[in-house]
Amino acid sequence: MSERKIHTLSTGLAVASPYYLGEGILKEFPRHLEPFEHDRIFLVTSLPLLDRFGRDFSRMLDGAGIPNRIVTIEEGEANKSWRTLSGLCERLVEAGVTRSSILLALGGGVVGNVVGLAAGLTYRGIRYIEVPTTMMAQTDGALSNKQAINGQAGKNQFGLYHAPLFVWADVAYLRQEPARQIKSAIVEGVKNGLVNDEVWLEVLASYLRDGMETIQERLEELTLDLIRSKLAILAKDPTEKRDAIVLEYGHTFGHAIEWLARGSLYHGEAVGIGMCIAARLSHGLGILSREGVERHYHLLGDLLGTVVELPPGIDPAGVCQVMLADNKRTGPDLRCLLLEDLGRPYRFQGDYLVRVSEREALGAMVRPAGARFGGGAAA
Ligand SMILES: NC(=O)c1ccc[n+]([C@@H]2O[C@H](COP(=O)([O-])OP(=O)(O)OC[C@H]3O[C@@H](n4cnc5c(N)ncnc54)[C@H](O)[C@@H]3O)[C@@H](O)[C@H]2O)c1
């Protein structure tokens, strides 16, 4: 059988890792692992993903004579926790992990984050490979060396930077993802356009106009395009600490909303709602035009069909409280990313994180009765 085409990219980060992407590339994995001496692979995944993909992966390793052991962790945002992390680290040690072992994270962003953090902490840092199985993890999470778990008061409060040996992204996995999850990942692609590239927004809009069926047909191409839309931003700041802060557009509100939604919203869905609020806030402060806000609603609501409104059970005042514990907070105030135009984040005195009052943030979340932007969004 002919070899599958593998695209070789780089995460483009300060500590950059090779990023391999293709469809149906499982058999090619041992060849890419070969340069890295190791005693054993610890394949870490969740129980549902073990049945879906994990056993095949382990069998492929067995077939290639690569010693491996499967370890499962709990999945879901609520389990991106100290409990899961410490449980994993202790079990790895118990199972005989050494400094020459390699962890392999097989799963979505939650598994990737927990395993990346465990790899960064175990014996002060061992190697790991990221095998992202969701579109969110392939196009966003794996293009970041940020590893984190959630705390009692909010998302991603405890973590570190740790780079994988390489990322292994098989588009075949994405074919099993529900449409809602694919849409949630595309939200981050919309964000990359909103903060960096209006032309990319047009390209993405044309994918969306073609509908989900065409997206399935062009899945590998879209995945590559989404990756490139993030790489274009990272190229300006591979450290993820300065200009790449624009990747957090919609995330101050989004993370708080995701936190309060307790699993009923996907990460991208919460970020989409967060971007609509940030756009309204930008407009309310006289920075962004009304058309700019409408474009958010059109892309996210009308074309993508994802959530654009705060769900009824989530109270704006509660969102403010959680935002005050946000991990990017540098003082007692709320600081948000705002847009002055599509593709152009706003800077105040050179800073992308702009101080806003609680009243202004609340005002952007509570819409006056009858107010309507764009074509009204689908839920
Ligand atoms: N480090 C970063 O920069 C970064 C960037 C983006 C997201 N994240 C984090 O990633 C997490 C979200 O990741 P996610 O969206 O991948 O969700 P997830 O990891 O919670 O996975 C969602 C669900 O998808 C299932 N799943 C995984 N692969 C599948 C497949 N191929 N087919 C069918 N089902 C599959 C999982 O079993 C799980 O139930 C959040 O915690 C977010 O904070 C981190």
Image (spheres, helix red, strand yellow):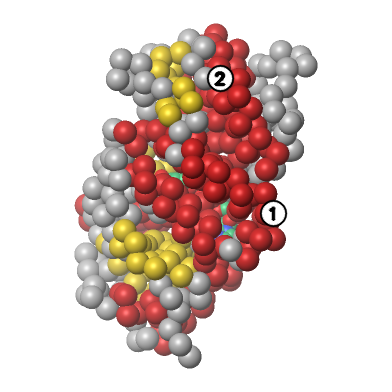
Residue drawn at (40%, 18%) of the image: 354
Residue 133 in picture, x, y percent from top left: 51, 62
Q: Is 258 on the left-hand or right-hand side of 225? A: right
Circle 2 crowding by C-alpha within 10 Å: few under 14, some 14–19, many from 20: some
Can residue 336 be seen by looking at this rendering? yes
Circle nearer the N terminus (1, 2): 1
Q: Quadrant of residue 283?
A: top right
For residue 99, above or below residue 303 = below
SS type, badge 1: loop
Say whether marks 1 and 2 touch (CB < 8 Å): no
Residue drawn at (44%, 53%) of the image: 227
Q: Is 280 on the left-hand or right-hand side of 84? A: right
Q: Amino acid at mark 2?
A: Ser
Residue drawn at (41%, 14%) of the image: 355
Indicate which disc residue 289 carries. Answer: 2
Residue 47 in picture, x, y percent from top left: 56, 64
Q: Quadrant of residue 245?
A: top left
Residue highlighted by disc 1: 211
For residue 372, above or below residue 100 = above
Q: Amino acid at mark 1?
A: Gly
Task: Using the image as rendered, state which of residue 86 and residue 164 is in the foreground.
Answer: 164
Can residue 147 be seen by looking at this rendering? no
Task: Using the image as rendered, state which of residue 82 and residue 14 is in the foreground.
Answer: 14
Q: Quadrant of the C terminus?
A: top right
Circle 1 crowding by C-alpha within 10 Å: few under 14, some 14–19, many from 20: few
Residue 342 in picture, x, y percent from top left: 50, 31
Q: Quadrant of residue 271?
A: top right
